[in-house]
Amino acid sequence: YKSNKISSTCLLLFMIFSSNYCYSVNASVRVASSIIQRGNHYKTHTTTARHLSRLRCRGGSSFHENRCRLTSLWTQHSQLSSTLAFISNNQHTMSSCNRDKNNIFQQKRWNMKPCNSPTKIAIQPSSSIKTKMSSSKLKEGEIGEEIAIAKNQQSLVSDMLFRIRECNTPIPQNVMEFHVDGKRIGKVTPKVANLLCSYSNTETKSPVFQTIASKEKYNTILTLTKEAGTTCQSRTKAIMSIMEQLRDDGHITGWRNELYPIAEGFYDEPLLLMERAATSFVGAIEYGVHINGLVRSSSNSENDDQSTTKMWMARRSKTKSKYPGMLDHIVAGGQPANMGLMENVIKECMEEAGVPTDVVKRGIKSVGAISYETFVVQQPTTNDDEGDDPRMVDGVISRVVLFCYDLELPSDFVPKVVDGEVESFFLWNMEEVMECIRKDYNDPMKPNCYPVVIDYLMRSGYVSPETVGYLDVLRELRSGDCC
């Protein structure tokens, strides 16, 4: 105690305070004063003795008040944490004295062995401290496991953002808006606008597109001439003539013979209908449906109350015009004109995977939408032998909104190839799905499938919101003004 008088005082007061048998402040102070002032072996600050004497004179009306005063006095000299550390890490020597009843009770409380001669009293850590010391070793393993999980989640979020940004590419700053009947329905680059204006209707030999000055944000906008008419039918016919010529000249590939509705918003009446493969040429929003085919089986383990989820995947046909042979959803398709979303889901499920209508209606669930904008750089046409064709475009803007659905399928159901758009189906567990998201995965999915799968993982809690980048993923899943 001579080496640390403050700590000895703290130890003494803590022992007095913690004893359940010191019911009055007067008794507590008498014990403290007698020990503090007993010989040179227990010298301490006179200030402490003075405070104790003052406290004894004050007395107290209740046990609670006395306990609070002792607590205040003890706090002035040391913190509880330093006292506990002092107790658990050191063995102290106390001279024997005339121990009264309070000393005996303290000995029992602190596991002391009383003896008749001066001896060393070993103060052992309490059982709770021993438990904490042993459990701390166990927690080290748990902490290491938590750190590993956090690193894996951080890596997963990084890969998610990489896959999302494959679809969300920078759009040129000098784009022009495409307006029909005073409503903005698309975006084009100046080169694409000039290309569209250079073609004429094959029947009337008059241009269908024109650029005019704008009174609003943009100085120049792309719009339709009077040749296109004012009805949905007349506009559709006039624009179809131009798009067919662009197809024949190699500017538009992957012709589908499938009409998309073109409007300012999804719920608005269409201003015209356009070939699906040509919509990006005017930067109009394309809509579609993507379906996560899920199989859930309950765990038989008593310690695991969660279900095991797997996801059906498809391999695209090698004859597809876009992304041949790549991984894909079990069912996905564009949203054609004159058809409701659920009607389209049921149709695509039957055509692409042979899922019966009753199975679809029983297991389907609408879960939201994702969106993205992509600047698709155009490759040189086959007719451009010298590479300096003035009608060559720089690129088109693909703007897409995909309505997402979760389809829970029976565990014994196996999808089958029907229309030839895919060549095979296979079932993946969620670890394999997340592995596929890695940026260096050598057999990736079609790019626009990734945002839908990532959206499912985020909704299902596979990523903690405490992971850095979590909110970036949520925000970038719905980019631009698509939604």
Image (cartoon, rainbow, N blue to C red):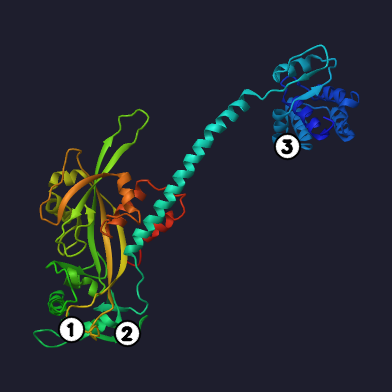
- Identify the residue at image location x=21%, y=82%: 196
Residue designated by label 3: 79
From the top left corner, tell me how far across and down residue 424 is, in percent: 16, 50
Q: Secondary structure at mark 3?
A: loop
Question: What kind of residue is marked 1?
Answer: Val
From the top left corner, tell me how far across and down residue 450 is, in percent: 30, 56
Give the left or right position of residue 304, taking residue 316 as reference.
right
- Count the marks: 3
Q: Secondary structure at mark 1?
A: loop
- Spatial distance from mark 1 to mark 3, Cα to Cα? 85 Å
From the top left corner, tell me how far across and down residue 327 is, in percent: 23, 54
**Mark 2 neighbour class, 10 Å CA radius: few under 14, some 14 to 19, many 20 or more:** some
From the top left corner, tell me how far across and down residue 320 is, in percent: 16, 62
Give the left or right position of residue 402, taking residue 143 as reference.
left
Give the left or right position of residue 402, taking residue 423 as reference.
right
**Mark 1 neighbour class, 10 Å CA radius: few under 14, some 14 to 19, many 20 or more:** many
Question: What kind of residue is marked 2?
Answer: Thr
Q: Mark 2 or mark 3: which is in front?
A: 3
Residue designated by label 1: 208
Residue designated by label 2: 220
Frontmost residue, 163 versus 276: 163
Q: Please, is residue 277 above or below residue 452 in the view?
A: below
Q: Earlier in the sequence, mark 1 or mark 3?
A: 3
Q: Please, is residue 466 above or below residue 40 in the view?
A: below
Q: Secondary structure at mark 2?
A: strand
Give the left or right position of residue 276, taking residue 108 as reference.
left
Q: Mark 1 or mark 3: which is in front?
A: 3
- Identify the residue at image location x=39%, y=57%: 473
Q: Earlier in the sequence, mark 1 or mark 2?
A: 1
